[in-house]
Amino acid sequence: MGKILRSLLLLLPVVAGACGQADEPRGDEVSAVQPLSAPAPAAAAVPARARIVFLGDSLTAGLGLPREHSVPSLVQARLDREDRHYEVVNAGVSGDTSAGGLRRLDWALEGDVAVLVVELGANDGLRGLPIEQMRQNLDQIVSRAKARGITVVLTGMEAPPNYGPQYTSEFRRVFRDVADAHAILFVPFFLEGVAGIPDLNNPDGIHPNAAGARIIEQTIWQVLEPALDKLDR
């Protein structure tokens, strides 16, 4: 974990430049946040599929990757191979904080959403935003999704160490505390097995390349698959 945090600290100026966009989705970003499978022609009368929404920042959006190599796209490809009738929506917006995710939650949850995967907090940590504020934002996101009967998967994140050990420790603990409080599915670290490994990241050193995205997809799938099995019974 120390290697990961040192890597985050060294790359802070690069990441801040890449991710430090406005929290509100820009016009070009909104247009990219769409279901990852093409809709069937109306004449075919194919029943609409339940949705799996990935609500996140540039790590979810797949910054620096072709669309088909983002983590949500890889999950969609696996679902299609296994003939599971779900539609994955990539609601990742570069630069988004937990507050930004909360503001666009209702929009992201439009339609028949069965599962919400929450990947937020990286930009909160990079900016040194108040941890309690992030906790409240994540709590509201989870609460509102659960109130709609949606299965929630929360993924954890690490903060760079330049804000001190107390901040990084409390930051890490927030994700597990929220997951435990709501008894939801939890992935301790979204970038597990990828962060700090040059061969698995783009030149900026923080956003996964195609090989890194495949590892993250496998990590998410280990939690997502049992949840879908339960929903499909």
Image (cartoon, rainbow, N blue to C red):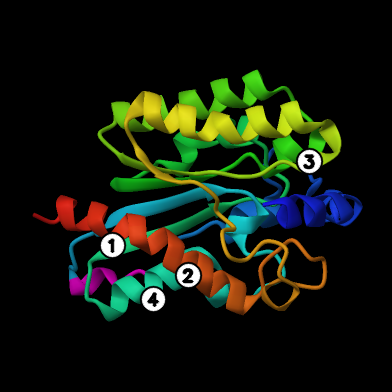
Which residue bears the numbered disc 4?
Answer: 77
State left or right for residue 151 relative to residue 209: left
Q: Is residue 162 magenta?
A: no
Quadrant of residue 66 within the rendered picture? bottom right
Q: Tell me the magenta residue range.
A: 37-44
Comes first in the chain, label 3 or label 2: 2
Please tell me whether mark 1 sits on a helix, a strand or a loop.
Answer: strand
What amino acid type should be assigned to the residue bearing mark 2? Ser
Which residue bears the numbered disc 3?
Answer: 126
- Residue contact at pointers 2 and 4, CB within 8 angstroms: yes
Comes first in the chain, label 1 or label 3: 1
Which residue bears the numbered disc 2?
Answer: 73
- Find the distance from the CA under tag 3 to the CA under tag 2: 26 Å
Q: Position of residue 43 (x, y in %)?
A: 22, 73
Comes first in the chain, label 3 or label 4: 4
- Find the distance from the CA under tag 3 to the CA under tag 4: 31 Å
- Residue contact at pointers 1 and 3, CB within 8 angstroms: no
Magenta segment main secondary structure: loop
